[in-house]
Image: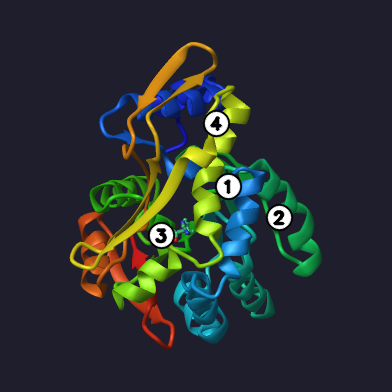
Amino acid sequence: GSTLTQTELNDSLKTKIDLFYDDVIAGLRSTPKRLNSKYFYDANGDKLFQELMNSPEYYPTNCELEIFSEKTAEIANAIIADGDAFDLIELGAGDAMKSTYLLKYLLSKNADFTYLPIDISENVISYLNITLPVTLPGLQITGLNGEYFHMLTKAASISSRRKVVLFLGSNIGNMPINDAIEFCRELRKHLSQGDMALIGMDLKKDPKVVLAAYNDKAGITKKFNLNLLTRINRELNANFDITKFDHYPTYDPETGACKSYLISTVDQQVTINGKETFTFLKDEYIYMEISQKFTVTQTDQIATNAGFTPVGQFFDSKKWFIDAIWVA
Ligand code: AVJ
C-alpha cells in the first residue's frame, strides 16, 4: 500500500541525527553493550569499505561480481519473466557496480524498466543519479534517499508496475537470522504476488577463509569498526579514545555467525553530548557487527518462511556466494 505505518511516520518526523543518537544511547545502555553496524557508512566508512573490497582477504564482493558478470543473461532472463514493464529496485545500491552488469544487459535487450536505487546515503543517491545515465545511455533512473521500507512505500506510490527488488552483497547477513526472516516478511508485505526478490547471501565455507576476510592483515576491518566511534565523537559530541579499544573478530562454523567486537583495553568512561556517561571495564566488549554465513538450504528456508518461493540459484565458481531469486 502507499500509506505510511505509524512507525514510519514517527521515524520520518525525527531527524537522522536524532535517530542515530537514540540508537547509540540505547545500545550503550544495554547489557552487553552494542552498536549498530548500519552506522559504519559515513563518508570515511564508505571509503574504508571500498578499501576492504580491494583487500586480498575480503572475498564476498569478488564472488558476487563474478556471478553478475558471468551469469548476466541467465539472471536477466529470470527477472524479465514474460516481458512486461517492471521497476528494478535496489536496496542499498552503493556504487551499483554489480547491478551495472545487469542494467547494461537489460538495456541491450530493450527491456522496459526503471531502475530505482534506494540508499540511506544522500551522497550515494546523487552520485548514481548523475553518473549512471552517462555510463548507461537510455537508462531510466529514479534514485531514492532514505530507509529501505519508507522508500519501498514511496516507490509503490509512484508506480504500480511489477517490482523486482535487488538486495545484494550479503547485506542481509548483517542481521541475526530471525531478524533477517522478519526483514524478508516485511519486504514481502511491500510486494504483490508475482513480484520478485534477488538476494545475495554469503555461504558457509572454510572457517579460516571467512575469519581472514574479517581480520585482514592490513587492519582495514579494524579501522572500519573504530571509525564508528570516531563518527560518534564527531556527530554526537562524544569523547571515545579509539586507542583504548581493540578489534576482536570471531567466526563460529557451527552457527555461521561471523561477529566483531571492540574490546575496552582499560577501565574508562566515555561521555556523549556532555550528559550521558558510560563506563567501560577493562576487557568489556561492544558488539559491533554480525555477518551471517548461510547454507543453501537455509537460504531456501528463509524464503519460504517469509512467504516467497525460491525459483533460481546462481553461484560463483567456488560456490562461496549465492544470488537467489524468489517470487512473491
Ligand atoms: C557489505 C555489509 C555485507 O558484512 O561482509 C565487511 C560489511 N563488515 N567487513 C559484510 C563488512 C566487515 C559487509 N557487508
The numbered dot on residue 128 is 2
**Mark 4 or mark 3, which is nearer the start of the sequence?**
3
Q: Are marks 2 and 1 in contact (CB under 8 Å)?
A: yes
Q: Residue furthest front?
A: 266
Percent from the top left, x then y, of residue 208? 34, 74
**Mark 1 or mark 2, which is nearer the start of the sequence?**
1
Residue at label 3?
195
| Crowding at mark 3 (Cα within 10 Å: few <14, some 14-19, many 20+) | many
Percent from the top left, x then y, of residue 182? 28, 46
Q: Is residue 47 left or right of residue 20?
A: right
Q: Residue at x 63, y 29 (%)?
A: 234
Helix or strand or loop: what does disc 4 sit on? helix
Q: Quadrant of the C terminus?
A: bottom left
Q: Can residue 147 be seen here?
A: no
Percent from the top left, x then y, of residue 288? 39, 44
Helix or strand or loop: what does disc 1 sit on? strand
Give the Cα distance between marks 3 and 2: 24 Å
Dot 2 amino acid type: Leu
Percent from the top left, x then y, of residue 51? 62, 63
**Mark 2 or mark 4, which is nearer the start of the sequence?**
2
Dot 4 amino acid type: Ile
Dot 3 amino acid type: Asp
